Every structure is written in C-alpha cells, then in structure tokens.
Image: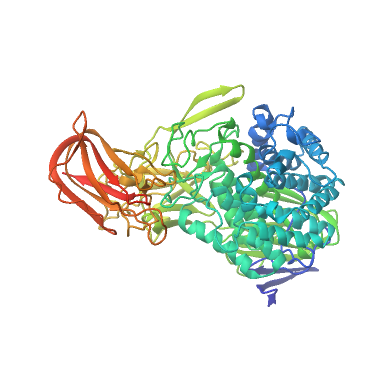
Amino acid sequence: MKAVGLAFLLLGSIGYGQERMEMRVVERMPMEGSNRFYVGNRSPLLPSPLIKLPTGSVKPKGWLETQLRLMADGLLGRLPEISPWCKWEGNAWANPKGEGHSHWEELPYWLRGFTALAYISGDQKLIAEARKWIDAILSSQDESGYFGPRENWRNRDLWPHMLALEVLRTHYEATNDKRVIPFMLKFCRWLMTVPFEDFLPPTKGGGWQHIRGGDLLDSILWLYNRTGEAWLIDLARIVHERTAPWAREVASWHGVNICQGFREPAQFWQVAKDTRYLQATIRNYETVMGIYGQVPGGMFGADENCRPGYTGPQQAAETCSIAEFVKSHAMLTRITGDGIWADRAEEIAFNSLPAAFTPDYKALHYLTAPNMVQLDRGNKAPFLQNAGTMLSYEPFETYRCCQHNHGLGWTSFVEHLWMATPQNGLAAVFHAPCEVTARVGDGTTVRIVVDTDYPFDEVVQITVRTPKPVRFPLALRIPSWCEGSTVKVNGRQLKGELKPNSFAIIERQWNDGDKVLLQLPMRLQVKVWEKQRNAISVRYGPLWFSLKIGERWEKYRQQGDWVAWEVFPTTPWNYGLIVDLQHPEKSFEIDRKPKPLPLQPFTVENAPIELKAKGKRIPQWTMVGGIVGPLQDSPVQSDEPVEELTLIPMGCARLRISVFPRIANEGEEGHRWKEVFNEVAEASHTWHMDTVEALHDGLLPQNSCDHSIPRWTAWDHRGTVEWVQYTFPKPRKVSWCEVYWFDDEPVGGGCRVPQSWRVLWWDGEKWQEVRSPSGYGVEKDKFNRVTFEPVMTTKLRIEIRALQGFSVGILEWRYGE
C-alpha cells in the first residue's frame, strides 16, 4: 500500500469482544488528511505529517522536569540579574520608540527560551516577566509595520526580529493573544515593501540574517497557516531567494550558522513541493557530519567555525550550536515525518546538551567536545579557534551568545515530545517522562501520561486519561538503533514486526485508563570511527558512554549566587579499550543502579548506568596546549597492565573520553603511540584559521594540497620573509630536518612552495645558519630533506622567503640527529 509515496504495512487486526485494534508500521508519518483542532500546513503547502502542539500542552515530568526547574532557578530564569543586555532600564526592546541600548540579539535570544520555559512550567512569576517584555515589543510597532529597536533597521539588520517573532509565536500559542496575528501581518506587509538590496543582505548585521533566513521563513509559514493570506506565500519565496544558497551548498562553515541554516531548503520544500530541496538539506547534514561529525554525541567540531583538519574528538561545539541543532532536528521531524531527525535530536539532548552546563544550570561553557579532560580558564588558542577561556564554566557574559541562547535546547525538546497528527491523532515523537493534554478524535480532550526512565531504561508506559471513549490514532516512534521492539495494549501484545526508524500507529477506541507499553530493547554497540584513526566509541541504546573520570571542581570567581568553575581530573584518563569487535557485548558488563532514578541523573555520582570494561593506559597520550592530544592509529600496542575501567553515559561526564584508542588484542599487531609535542612551535605570523601546532602534529599529508589535516600558513602575508621555529625543553642534537610544503594550487591561489629557505640554530646569544647544508628543496608532494653539520641547540628555526604575490605554508616539519 502507498500513501503519498510513503510505504506502510498493515500488521495486525485484533478483536477482543467489541474492541477492534489495528497497528500499522510506517517508515514516515504519512501526509494524508488533516487535523481539525491544530494548525498544520494549508494548501498549497505540502500537508503536515506532524503538527506542533501549542506551547504548554506538554508538561515534563521526572528527570526532564528537573532540568527545566533547575534552568528556571539558574541562568535562564534569572539572567536579568547578571546580564547587562537583559536590564529593563534604557533597553531599546523595552522602549515604545525602539530607542536605547541593548538593541541587538541578546534580549530576544534569551526571551525565546525564557518565554517557552515560562509557559511550559506555568510559573506565574516567569510568565509575568515574559509578558512585560512581550507587551513592550507589541507596543513598539510604528505605522509602517516595523517594530523593535530602530538601530537594527538603520543597520538594515532583521536578524534580531526573527528571534522576536518566535517569542511572539510562543506567546500566541500559549495565550491566543489577539494582538499577535495583526502585529505579525503588519510587519510582513512592511517586509514586502523593503527593496531587495536591503532585504537580508549578506553584508549587514554580521551576515546572520542572510545565512539564517530560514528562521524568518518559518514564521511566515506559521502566519500563513493561521491566516490563509496568499501574499505570504510570495513573501516566503522572496525570503528563500534572499537567503544564502543552502540549496546549492553548505553556505557557511560557522557552527551556529550550520545548525540553523542547513534546514532552510527542507523548509522551502513545503512551498516548492520539489523533493530536491529536501535532498539538499539531507546533503548539507551529511556533508558536515561526514567531515566534522565523525564522533559520538550528535554534534560536529566547530569551535566557532569548522576548520580544515580540525576534525578530531577534541574539537568542540558551541553551546549555541547544541541548542540550535536540537531545535532544527525537531523542526525537520515535524516537516518530514521522518523519525531519523528525532533520533538525532535525542542523541544531542541526552549526550551533548547536559555537559554544557554545571549540574545546577547556573553556569555554562562555550565549548563541549567528546574528548575533554580539563576545563580550566587557560587560553587554548590556536588548538581552539578563539582565545580566552573557552572551557571553564562561567555564569557571566564571557560567553555572550550562549549565555542568552542556551534555553532553546531543552525547551525545544519538551515542546516537540508529542505532536498532533492528521486524522486527529497524537504521536509520541521523543521519549521522556511527561504529560500531554490535547484534543483528539471527535474533539475530546485527553490527557496522556508517560512514565519512563528512558533514555536510561527500555520501557515506556503510556496511560490514556479520557472523560469518555474516543477513537483516534496513536503513533509511537521506533528509534533507528532499536531492533525487536514490542507494543502491548492493556497487556496484550500487538502482532507484527516493528522495524527500526519507523512509527507504529495504533488505531482504536481508547478508554480511560488504557495502557500502552512500548518496549525498546537496548543493546551494546561499538562504533569504529575510520576517520578517527580507527578509534572506537561505545553505545547502549540512545546513550554513548565516556570514561568515568574523577572531578575536582575549583571556584575562581563568585558574585552572589553565581560562581565560575574550573574542573580538573583526579584520575587517569589516557586509556585505550580492550574490545572484541565481533562480539562487543562480551567486552562489557552492564551495571544498572537501583531505582528510583535520580531527579538529576546527569552527574558522575548519579549516573544511572555504568559499563564495566577492560583497558590499558597509553602513557604517551598526553594533553597538548591544555586539551586532549590527537588520536593515533588503532589498534595500539601498550605494555601497561590490564585495568578494569568504568564507563558512564556521556551526558553525565563533564570530563570525558568518549572516543577511545583500541588496544590490540592478543596476537594482533598494534601501533606504538608516538610521543609528540615535546617542543614548542612558534611563527612570525599565523593565519587565524591555521595553527603552528600543525608543524609537529604527526599527521602526514597525502599531497601538498591536502586540506584534510591542519596546516600552518603565513597567509595573508605575501612575498615576505617568514619564520617558524621549535624551542626544546633542553638542548638537543640536530643534524637534519625535512619540510612538507603546503601548496594550494589548483584549489586556491594563496600559497605556493617558497622561493627559498634556510635552517638556523640558536647558539645561546644569536641565530646562526647551519653549516654545509645538503640543499634546500622546494618540491611539492614530498618531504624536502636537508642534512647539515650537527648542532647542539635549544632552538631550531626555518627562515622562508615567499614567492612574489604568494604566501607560504607547511603541513609537517620533522628533524633529528
């Protein structure tokens, strides 16, 4: 059977007295029919396979409710106490004429997550605070239709308004405030008068509006679905045309831009009905993750931008990126009806999001990586792109964007836990403890209660509370990692095979107290990351696992309730795992902690599941510049004794090793780990996207134009004399060195092999050129080796003269006796 090209299979029809139940399994939620009670896509848009319920319809319970309560008492709920951008006095967002300070993204960034939190929780104090700002925004619209800070439009920047529109949508869904729809229509009519050269230009406001036009597109389609104003479809097309060309390519390699922008073609697919737009979003995701996301946890390395060669598990994602990626995956689940996007949202929410915060949500850090073993305030540049403290936990404006935007992560997750479906049904999209109140079937309001310890347990129990019998379809998402799942209704198992990455749809008359039991068997899996030198990660159901590392929290700044923290390891971390790749379940012992589940499970002490494993230390694997040293080839030969190790869920681990070298098994030939970075590299100039550490990172290039590994370049210095040098911890004898030049011809036009170069050594007082050099080669695609009379020195330098009009670069520089 086919429904709009989406296959489904009728699996069971069971009669018990007068009761009739049907269960069918669909690969994607079908785009057929409509919902009488909730607003999905109007014609001519593609029909909605899933429909977001109004904010406040879903109430979290258990461990998930704890996350939101902590956020309410933490940064998100109390940010005006410490953020200068969230102060009411003089704020341009609070001024009816839009004049004042703090006019840009910070206030609406914060208000987006804060407003959702207020209405989800029902906390009247939070609601009152949100309403204060919302009333101010609604009162700021002028006769033209423009609203908010006038400074933004003087800069031709609509990015902050995209955020404010989302705040108003959340408020409307929760309250039906009759001011919102006319307000948004008037603003959109103003947008239709903006000259094209001023509409989302890439040169204004940092370019965010041009890259992130999909956020504006989403609000326009939301408004069209509630008004039917046909001209809004024309505006949607204009927004797509003026947005960066995500349909053609990954239009930006900035991490947050990717997390928001990659989905824009799929959003426009609803308008164009051309599947190539959906495929473009899929291609964007696969391109980014295929290079920078070859790690557990659902994120990719972009510490602020994705950088060629910086693809290892020590590369991190911004907290902003984590929050935005959860939201984007939830949106794509709604738009496509494909559960794979829900899998991706859960992977981030359970594994990457919690560790971005202190357990009390009163501080966060800028970057979170799969491998990170010391969260100090030291400068990690150039290993990390930005200078300053990027890893310590700060409550203050150190991480300005993340500080205001972080609330979007858990609130987006909660708002999309359950969605409405065509045929007046409901769908369990994400699995977590919650209650949902919604109209179904003939209009009856039902309450669905979900009791589960998922993702730490395999059982999801759903209880239907209804004032009278009502017939409606109930859809249950089966994750892509899950095989052998089962569904029981009132103790009776429904027949049929529930395939991974599908939805089981149960059509029946539901009575008060009916219970559905969804069993999601979890199994141990070991993932071999071929692009991480065959290192491995361990997965159990939706959870990835990290080494359990002792934590020492040190306070370094305090202002009232707000504390800044560094976290240091108290136990060794440089282990490889001993694993049977053919039978990984034999290599681990699962240890479940006694119930009840801790309300805050995301800590080392409260980890609900532990895995016992075997491993060996790799003493040569050390920290480099304050972060975990790069991986080397697995399997690894280690002479250290076998030790019993404990692994905990990745989301519980602030200090973590989640991508492990694999220790060679008996009879298997392993690689010896080479000690690197025992010298300090410096340069006369380094392009900000490159690093001097590439000179000695041990990563060997395939050719001189190899963009897959880090490099040092002196770009954008052209035709100059530059130098690179090593400083040794103690004098050492050197008689040769060899250089692998970076040359980006024909890909780029910036770097070429040099005109000439020479080797210098430090005699304790001045630089001397080495004697009797054998020759200074400038050939591409090979090491250019020079020998010379031995010198004993603490510093070695290469002086390089670039060709006229070009810069120079090096992929690897080696030396020896």
Q: Who's the residue at 51% across and 57% down the image?
A: 288
In this rendering, does residue 310 appear at all? yes
Q: Which of 745 and 109 is in front in this view?
A: 745
Q: In this view, does 22 lie above or below 398?
A: below
* Residue 561, x across and y down, in percent: 61, 24
In this rendering, does residue 38 appear at all? no
Q: Residue furthest bottom?
A: 1
Q: Who's the residue at 34% across and 39% down the image?
A: 684
* Quadrant of the image occupied by residue 717: top left
Say left or right for 797 vs 16. left
Say left or right for 589 vs 224. left
* Residue 430, x across and y down, in percent: 64, 54
Say left or right for 687 vs 107. left
Q: Which of 801 and 393 is in front in this view?
A: 801
* Residue 362, x across and y down, in percent: 60, 32
Q: Which of 754 and 224 is in front in this view?
A: 754
Q: Give the quadrant of the C terminus.
A: top left
* Quadrant of the image occupied by residue 490: bottom right
Q: Who's the residue at 75% across and 47% down the image?
A: 165
* Residue 161, x across and y down, in percent: 72, 45
